Amino acid sequence: MFSVYLPVFLMIAVSALVALGMFTATSLAGPRNMTREKAIPYESGSETTGASHIRLSIKFYLTAILFVVFDIEAVFLYPWASLFRDLGWFGLVEMVMFLTVLGVTLVYAWKKGALEWET
């Protein structure tokens, strides 16, 4: 049983070592001179204006969640497309049902105004 999962454990171990090595290398090789300009918060390269502790609109979070949902849809479409001939009609019907549910979800979100970005 262990031999089946050995490649997965090796991949996790190598990934952890690479990540740890990168963090260690950047902390050892990088400069540590913190200046006043580096310490100020910024967004997209420009200085922030106004209060720093403002609450974001729920529209921001709703848009992010919808993006994740439809991004996952794309993740499921690629393996399905690569196995399309092997899955046959059953696979086609299942994917049409999946896309229909996501389409209804998109229409519902659109009708509720979740895709409107107004401040």
Image: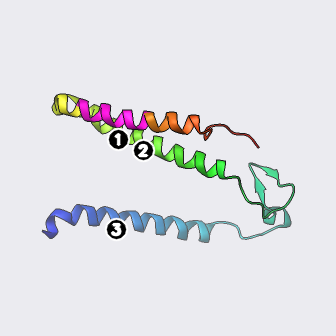
Magenta stretch, residue numbers: 92-103
Q: Which mark is residue 13?
A: 3
Query: Is disc 2 placed on a helix, strand or loop?
Result: helix
Q: Residues within 10 Å of mark 1 (few under 14, many from 20)?
A: few
Q: Residue furthest left?
A: 1
Query: Is disc 1 placed on a helix, strand or loop?
Result: helix
Q: As shown in the figure, which amino acid type bears the numbered disc 1?
A: Phe
Residue at left 22%, top 34%? 91
Quadrant location, the N terminus: bottom left
Q: As shown in the figure, which amino acid type bears the numbered disc 3?
A: Ala
Residue at left 62%, top 38%? 113
Quadrant location, the C terminus: top right
Q: Which mark is residue 76?
A: 1
The residue singled out by tag 2 in the image is: 72
Q: Mark 2 to mark 1: distance in Å?
A: 6 Å
Mark 2 vs 1: CB contact within 8 A: yes
Relative height, residue 99 to residue 11 (above, below): above
Residue at left 31%, top 61%? 11
Quadrant position of residue 79? top left
Q: Mark 3 to mark 1: distance in Å?
A: 27 Å
